[in-house]
Amino acid sequence: MIGMTMVDKMKRTQFLGREFLTWLLFRAATDEGVFRDDEAGEVQVLFERAITLEGDNPAREMTTIKVDDPTDSAEVMLALRIGKKVSRAKLLVEAGGNEYALTLDAASLAMKSIKLPESMEMDPMDVMTERAGFAADLETALHRLFLGFIRLRRDLDAWSIEVSKMAQWIGPFVQT
């Protein structure tokens, strides 16, 4: 699109981040958050304690819920039933034999408050190199998950089936 700024492009596609996190929540609840990829192997995503959900007007329709297991929370399910989507979540990601903790923001897909695995190195330069490698591995794992979601989202038949499964999981829509 000619004349479209990067900010305009981000605003037009911002909904994808919320859909992605909501889909991850669904998969975490129904498939134990296990994703298999021929190239990257297995990645597991678990939702931790805090989750933020937003409706169409985030300024008025934002809910942050803190529970031990957001995938098994009546409050989270009610928010989903009234049409809210996940906009921020604390995640545990296990990839390549390493465990990472982070907060993922749907609007920008920015990773925040990242906790990397402990380094086994002694030399400070080796520690920095290893930690940079951990950060790159985490970014790659999340990137592959997002690409998998986008591929699913673009396949109209597969996405329709996935949306039906998600709707069954969420339950009947509640009018507010």
Image (tube, rainbow, N blue to C red):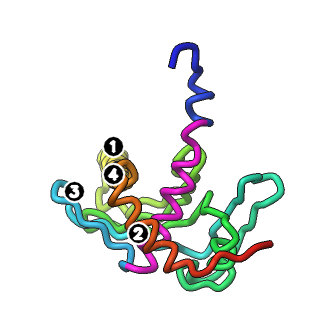
**Local secondary structure at mark 4:** loop
Q: Residue furthest right?
A: 60
Q: What's the amino acid at mark 2?
A: Val
Residue contact between numbered discs 3 and 1, judged by CB atoms under 8 Å = no
Q: Earlier in the sequence, mark 2 or mark 4?
A: 2
Q: Which quadrant holds the C terminus?
A: bottom right
Q: Which mark is residue 45?
A: 2
Q: Is residue 101 above or below residue 145?
A: below
Residue at the spot of label 1: 125
Check contact, mark 3 vs mark 2: CB within 8 A: no
**In the foreground, 148 or 128:** 148
Q: Between disc 3 and disc 4, whose residue precedes? A: 3
Residue 61: percent from left, percent from top: 78, 60
Taking the magenta stretch, the answer to whether it contains residue 140 is no
Regarding mark 1 in the picture, which secondary structure is present there?
Answer: helix
Magenta residue span:
12-30
Give the mark, 3 or 1, whose residue is nearer the N terminus.
3
Which numbered disc covers residue 155? 4
Q: Is residue 49 left or right of residue 149?
A: right
As measured in the structure, the alpha-carbon distance from the residue carrying label 3 to the one carrying label 4 is 21 Å
Whether residue 143 appears in this view of the structure is no
> Mark 1 and mark 2 in contact (Cβ < 8 Å)?
no
The secondary structure that most of the magenta stretch takes on is helix
Q: Looking at the picture, tell me which residue is in the foreground, 61 or 96.
A: 61
Real-space Cα separation, disc 2 to disc 1, in angstroms: 30 Å
Q: Secondary structure at mark 3?
A: loop
